Image (cartoon, helix red, strand yellow):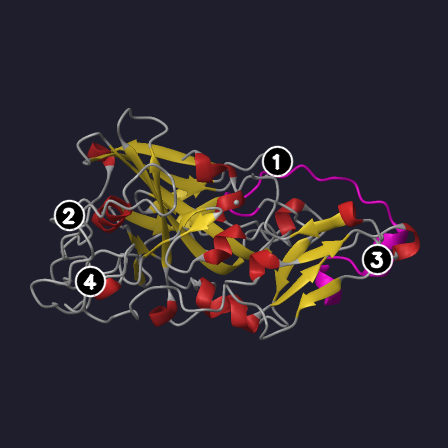
Amino acid sequence: MAPYGKNLFSLAARLVTPLAFVALGAHCGGSGDEPAGAAGDGSVPRGDSASGGGAGSPNQAGWGGNPVNAGSGGSGPPAGGAGPGGAGGGGGAGPGGAGGEGGGLTGLDDDADGIDDGLETTLARRFAPLLRLTANEQYRPGSVAWYLPRVHLRFNHDNCFDHEILALGEVTADNLGQQSHPNNGSLCQHSGDAEDQLPSNAKHLEFFLQPPDDAAHGGAPPADWRAYAHVKKSQTIAGGYDVQYWFFYPFNSTIANFDHEADWEHITVVADASEAIAQARYAAHSGGTTHPASALELVPGTSRPVGYVALGSHATYNKPGEYLTEAPDFVFTDQADGEGPEFDTSVGLVNVGERGKPLNGQAWVNYGGRWGEIGEFSNTSGPPGPAFQGAWDAL
């Protein structure tokens, strides 16, 4: 990894060599062109079974206060504690099993999206995908809470040195979206104008997160893998819901040198007005594919779709196989054999709420910068977070 967040070329080369723009198809989580911490991630530790307990807090129904996860890997007691107005969930089933959904209506809408927060919890748990990674995958999933203690927050000044905003160990879910930094004036000097102060809670891709070395690229131990749910009114079905599941990988590997740090991928399950699964969209590179419920592989006895994650690129497909990429100007094959480890996204699942009104301590959704270092092109630069990508308000 090059110092000051620049890969492929040295800073000196950038100052003297004009670089032609290379038009590449943006990875679904890899481009900076899409429209928005290390506190705990608000979830039960991976592998813990759910249990009953005290009443949930005002915006967390059931499961002893935990907003989404019932846990897997063991049966929980028959009922969890009910939050205000919400029904307690059933015990968590083993991986792939049908655990209780928990949630229930709470009468609360703390993220101001017009959907009861308890219903969001119910829907998020009902459709949580089961991901099957490819054999020999070197770049495995992670989580926000695992990643943030391992990175600096920096600010990129074109043709000048980067500046450190938060040092290693200082970055948290809460402060990530609370920073600001001025643009440069002439001769790489900061402008003194107040209007040149750029906040990190807006889409300013000059901000970027950078690990000090490559140690984080391989991902977290499986116990620290997490998925993040975002529930909104459906864009395609009247009275329905779009239930998005976002997955974070610390590194994306594709072809040649067109790799990048940080990779946000997602699957969107579309529920109809009766809250039944109608279709699902699997993100892949600059687009993705949408499949009706009849074409989905579901975890037996559930409404949870299965996804097959491509080697290195982490594009997700509804069936195992080889797939030509959707990126223009390049033809290469995604391999998604499903023979690697499983990622059960229901374990530790967190409902993040909305940008500007996050739920369950997930204030990192307000951060509008990049999640990896800045390269020479958008395809070699870390992407912005989920709430600043176009899919956040679409599929």
- Is 259 placed left or right of 375 in the picture? left
Between 373 and 54, the one nearer to me in the picture: 54
Amino acid type, mark 2: Thr
Q: Which residue lies under the disc numbered 3?
A: 160
- Mark 2 crowdedness (10 Å alpha carbons): few <14, some 14-19, many ≥20: some
Towards the viewer: 67 or 296: 67
Image: magenta residue range: 1-30
> Decide: marks 1, 4 in contact (CB < 8 A)?
no
**Marker disc for residue 63:** 4
**Crowding at mark 3 (Cα within 10 Å: few <14, some 14-19, many 20+):** some
Q: Callout 1: helix, strand or loop?
A: loop
Q: In the image, what residue type sits under mark 3?
A: Cys
Is residue 313 among what the camera can see? no
- Judged by depth in the image, the label closer to the viewer, 1 or 3, is 3
Pick out the residue farthest to the top.
238
Q: Main secondary structure of the magenta part?
A: loop
Task: Point out which mark residue 33 bears.
Answer: none
**Which residue is located at x 14 percent, y 68 percent?**
52
Q: Position of residue 108 (x, y in %)?
A: 28, 46
Distance Cα–Cα, label 3 vs label 4: 51 Å
Spatial separation of the CA atoms under disc 1 and disc 4: 49 Å
The span from disc 3 to disc 2 (Cα, nearest Å) is 54 Å
Q: Which residue is mark 2?
A: 302
Amino acid type of the residue that numbered disc 4 sits on in the rendered structure: Trp
User: What is the spatial separation of the Cα atoms under label 4 and label 2, in whole angstroms?
Assistant: 20 Å
